[in-house]
Image: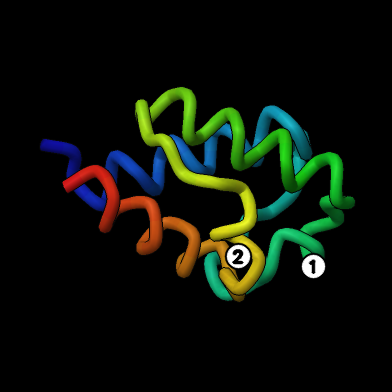
């Protein structure tokens, strides 16, 4: 069973790979970190793959922040 900290680490690693050098603020939206729509899809797809989660991309449209993304994914892996 994955912990929230594990999920957070996976999300942060994916963000760092797609947006190298960006300072990750959990309260910020991915757009606020400089991610365009392609970057956001790449981040989400990488995280889904690493966590083994199947979820339609449309489910992520209302996720308001990095922390909310972590919580959303954690609910699906625990």
Camera-side mark, 2 or 1: 1
Measure the alpha-carbon separation of dots 2 and 1: 9 Å
Which residue in the structure is indicated by mark 2?
25
Element marked by disc 2 = loop
Q: For the N terminus, give its image quadrant.
A: top left
Vertical side of 35 occupied by 29: above or below: below
Q: Residues within 10 Å of mark 1 (few under 14, many from 20)?
A: few
Element marked by disc 1 = helix
Q: Residue 34: name its quadrant.
A: bottom right
Q: Residue at x 80, y 41 (%)?
A: 39
Give the side of residue 16 with respect to residue 40, left or right.
left
Q: Residue at x 48, y 34 (%)?
A: 48
Residue 51 shows which numbered tag? Answer: none
* Residue 57 picture location, percent across and down: 62, 48
* Residue 62 picture location, percent across and down: 61, 73
Give the side of residue 18 with respect to residue 11, left or right.
right
Q: Are marks 2 and 1 in contact (CB under 8 Å)?
A: yes
Q: Residue at x 79, y 67 (%)?
A: 32
């Amino acid at each position: 069973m994955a912990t929230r900290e594990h999920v957070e680490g996976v999300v942060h690693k994916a963000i760092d790979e797609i947006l190298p050098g960006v300072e990750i603020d959990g309260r910020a939206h991915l757009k606020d970190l400089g991610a365009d729509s392609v970057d956001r899809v790449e981040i989400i797809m990488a995280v889904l793959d690493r966590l083994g989660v199947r979820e339609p991309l449309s489910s992520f449209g209302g996720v308001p922040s990095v922390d909310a993304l972590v919580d959303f994914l954690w609910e699906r892996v625990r």
